[in-house]
Amino acid sequence: MRCGRFYWPIASFGAAMIFASDARAAKEAAPAPAKACCADIIVTARKREEPLSSTPAAISAFDGAAIEARSATNLAAIALLAPNTSFEATAPVSGSSNAASVFIRGIGQSDFAITTDPGVGIYRDGIYLGRAIGSALDMVDIGRIEILRGPQGTLFGRNTIGGAILVTTNPPELGTVHGEIAATTGRFSRRDVQAMLNLPMTRTLALRVAGAYRRRSGFGRPRAGSRNPA
């Protein structure tokens, strides 16, 4: 149960203030903004940028606004929203909460061993994650997630018999300094903090840094007199 979430935006340089003499007239004259749910997402499922509505593939896509609206903290929370997709962590058997067991249309791999190839390929910014360990990614400064269902060997190569999951982070932006800090608290001493900072270095070079810290206590309590490893 989430108790609260707070945002502190970092001010950027050159902020402008616009004063309207007649707010009501301006509101009536301005066109109605498009709804976020109806916006067409640009995807790269076919190795080129194109609108989701014109991509002839079985694909589910979520942009940054959709990810934030669902309060997703890891890739499993988003992948479960796609049809015919199962995304679970293998912590009960591997002891690692970042090892993924992914199945799309019944094809996947549940073995977390480092010698085992997955049946669903996971890519972060075009880089293939070749093993299950480390594939359960956190949602930090994510721009877009695409879930492709069905064999993708033609465009993405081996280990994509079941499908592919493409994770794209937000790129650095030139000419603006901005950032964001988000904090979440909850039951069982939950403490989540994530931050992002965008810094333009030169006219053609910019740096974007993002990170997260997550901690939560267990569901049980130690007996009186015993040592708490936490």
Image (cartoon, helix red, strand yellow):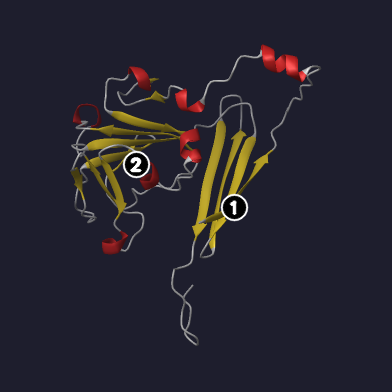
Residue at image point 59% right, 17% down: 32
- Classify mark 2: helix, strand or loop: helix
Residue at image point 31% right, 40% down: 122
Residue at image point 33% right, 48% down: 135
In the rendered structure, which amino acid carries the disc numbered 2? Ala
Side of 1 relative to 202 (left or right)? left
In the rendered structure, which amino acid carries the disc numbered 1? Gly
Residue at which label 1 appears: 4
3D distance between C-alphas at marks 1 and 2: 25 Å
Residue at image point 29% right, 57% down: 90
Which image quadrant for residue 151? top left
Residue 93, image x, y percentages: 26, 63
Residue at which label 2 appears: 79
Q: Is residue 189 above or below residue 177?
A: below
Count up the numbered dots.
2
Asked if the residue at tag 2 contacts the one at tag 1, i.e. Cβ–Cβ closer than 8 Å, the answer is no
Which image quadrant for residue 123? top left
- Residue farthest toward the bottom in the current orientation of the protein: 225
Residue 169, image x, y percentages: 45, 36
Which image quadrant for residue 157? top left
Label located before the other in sequence (1 or 2): 1
